[in-house]
Image: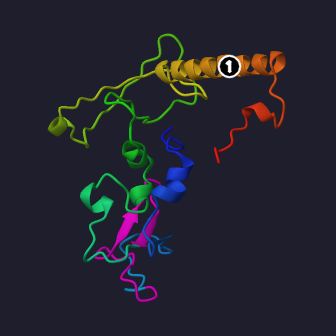
Amino acid sequence: MEEGIAWTSDLEYRFRQPQGFESEECVCDTCSCAEGATSEGKPWSCDENNKHYVKSDGTCHKYYYPNEEVTQYLHETYPMISPLEGVTDEHFVVWMRIASHPTFRKFYGYFENGFKKGDVVTFVIENNWIVKNFKGSKSLVITTTSAFGGKTTQLGGCFIGVGGISLLAALFFGLKHIFKPRKLADEKYLKYKAE
C-alpha cells in the first residue's frame, strides 16, 4: 500500500493544491469527446487538445490550475506525478519532509499482510530523483515497523536518557521538599536594598 504514508498535517496544511485548482470527472464516456471548451471561463474540457487526465481505473478527469502561463507545476516537471494529486502526492510529501540526520530513510509503502517463509517479493525500481549531485546514494530497505516507527534506537535512547535525568531531578527535589521544606514567605530568604 502506498496511501497513508504521509503525515495528515502535511497533506492538509503544508502541501495542498494551489488556491483556484479545480478538477472533476468527465461525464462523457471517453476523453476524446468534446464536452465544451470552458467551464465558468476556465480552459478545461475532455477534448484531447485540452487538459485531461485518465486515472488508472479508466475514468477521465478534467482539471484547471490557475496562472499556468507563469507557473510551472509539479506534474509538468515530473510527469510521473498525477496532475490531479500534484503536490499532495504522498511520495512527494514524504520526500520533502526534512530529515534530522544526513543518513535517513523515507517511507515508500507498506504491506498490509505479512510474508510467509518462501514468499518471493519482486520490486521494479525507477530512479526519478537524482542524488548524485550531493554525493548521495539510495538503498531499498525492507523492515518491520510499529506504532513508534522503525528499528532505529537512537531516538528511543534519547527519550529514555532525558526521561531518566528528569526522574532523578524530580526525586531529588521531592526528597528535599519532604525533609527540608521551605516555609512560605520565610523572611530569611528576603533581601532588602540598603537605604
In the depicted view, which residue is nearer to us: 31 or 66? 66
Whether residue 156 sits left or right of residue 128 in the image: it is right
In this view, which residue lies farthest toward the front?
195
Q: Which residue is the site of mark 1?
A: 167
Whether residue 163 sits left or right of residue 70 in the image: it is right
Quadrant of residue 191 in the image? top right
User: In the rendered structure, which segment of residues is drawn in magenta?
Assistant: 39-63
The main secondary structure of the magenta stretch is loop
Whether residue 134 sits left or right of residue 117 in the image: it is left
In the depicted view, which residue is nearer to us: 116 or 150? 150
Residue appearing at x 27%, y 54% in the figure: 78
Residue 114 visible somewhere in the drawing: no
Q: Where is 20 relative to 134, above or below?
A: below
Quadrant of residue 113 in the image? top right
**Residue 189 placement (x, y as % from top left):** 73, 33
Whether residue 112 sits left or right of residue 70 in the image: it is right
Residue appearing at x 51%, y 58% in the figure: 13
Residue appearing at x 31%, y 64% in the figure: 73
SS label for mark 1: helix
**Residue 120 placement (x, y as % from top left):** 42, 18
Amino acid type shown at disc 1:
Leu
